[in-house]
Amino acid sequence: MPTLEKMYSMGHEEVVFYADPSCNLKAIVAIHNTILGPALGGTRMWPYKTEDEALEDVLRLSKGMTYKASVSGLNLGGGKAVIIGDPEKDKSEALFRSFGRLVESLNGRYITAEDVNIKVEDIEHIFTETNNVCGVAIPHGGSGNPAPYTALGVFKGIEASCLKIFGDRSLKGKVVALQGAGFVGRHLGELIAQAGAKVFVSDINEKNIKLFLEMIPSAEVVGVDAIYGVKCDIYAPCALGATINDKTVEQLKCKIVAGAANNQLAEPRHGDILRSRGILYAPDYLINAGGLMNVSIEFEGWSDSKARRMVDTIYDTTLEIFRIADKNNITTYKAADMWAENRIESIRRIGSRYMGVSQHRFPGRKRRNLNS
Ligand code: NAD
């Protein structure tokens, strides 16, 4: 489908393609919806094989951010960026500063942050060129890496799911199959193990498995394909999206799917299959919103305790979504979509007051000083 047609059918407002050969930067920014506020969503760096693959990813991810902000009660819209490149070889200060200039040129309609393969150091380079960036280092007025807060939110979602399925929120004695030993996976693994559950983990990256085992020595490593078939209470996808697909959905031997990865269902019908198999699905964008909540309060002055209080609300919101799903006899992903869409539609009807300018945010915070 041509790009404009794709944007039109998915409801995107704007997609920006950007190239800077001087630093080997190829990037796409997708702004999905700004009715609730400026579009906030991280930047992902990935060695996409084709431009189409990168476009597909950024369109799906940015739409997910609109729903995530809405269901979380945040006054933010949805957006996302992708940089096409190999994070091991192609990162440079110049690349991220050039990307920062692109973000600045959008005049506050899009605010970026960390996503897969983007670290606080990279964000700091972006911050040299624009104020429209979150997840900035704590000494520079930011909140640092959002992953621990994302993990905490996912943990709250898992607790809510346990209450629904087992009648008790505690994870003591439960078995969790965790896919992806990255930033979020490691923090989540730690919380799960501390709560008294057994963790099985898989990753394609040996280095991250080693880091995982240093943090959670009791964990057991399983093969990349074997993780789907682990007999467990909870399957927690914390790697990339679309891991619940035609090939894997019938392999799952769990009672709950609840993890951090965005776009876990390859297609909505896979959510229907989970339901028909009696597996409770905690919608991804609902329970992985902790990182977004955390960075969102950089606008007004971040504190760890405030971020944790916000992230705690994911427990109640998840239970509410389960209640809506039961009441309407629909899947949990449809219930979350319904909630998110209703909120956006109701605010659209009263007229959005978001002006698309950045001066009102980050009071007192200046762009990063080159010498600091
Ligand atoms: P990360 O890059 O640190 O970790 C991802 C891990 O998944 C890596 O270790 C990678 O090797 C592994 N992986 C990739 N393919 C795999 C496969 N087929 N099987 C097993 N492991 C595989 O990223 P992260 O920050 O931990 O984020 C993890 C997921 O959570 C992503 O989907 C991300 O979009 C989502 N998410 C992250 C945040 C955040 O705060 N970082 C917030 C919301 C959602």
Image (tube, rainbow, N blue to C red):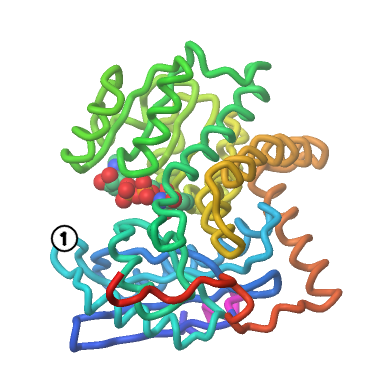
Counting from the top left corner in percent of width and height, residue 48 is at: 27, 67
Identity of the residue drawn at 77% across and 61% down: 343
Q: Nearer the viewer, residue 223 or 318?
A: 318
Identity of the residue drawn at 31% across and 43% down: 182
Which residue position is annotated with label 1? 88
Residue 92 appears left or right of 219: left
Vertical arrangement, residue 151 with respect to residue 13, above or below: above
Q: Mark 1 Cα within 10 Å, few/some/many (few <14, many 20+)? A: few
Q: Let me know if residue 242 appears in the view.
A: no
Element under disc 1: loop
Identity of the residue drawn at 55% across and 72% down: 364
Counting from the top left corner in percent of width and height, residue 120 is at: 33, 58
Could you tell me what secondary structure mostly forms the magenta stretch? helix
Counting from the top left corner in percent of width and height, residue 154 is at: 52, 38
Region of the chain picked out in magenta, as a range: 5-12
Q: Nearer the viewer, residue 331 or 246?
A: 331
Residue 275 sits in which quadrant? top right
Vertical arrangement, residue 281 with respect to residue 59, above or below: above
Vertical arrangement, residue 185 with respect to residue 67, above or below: above
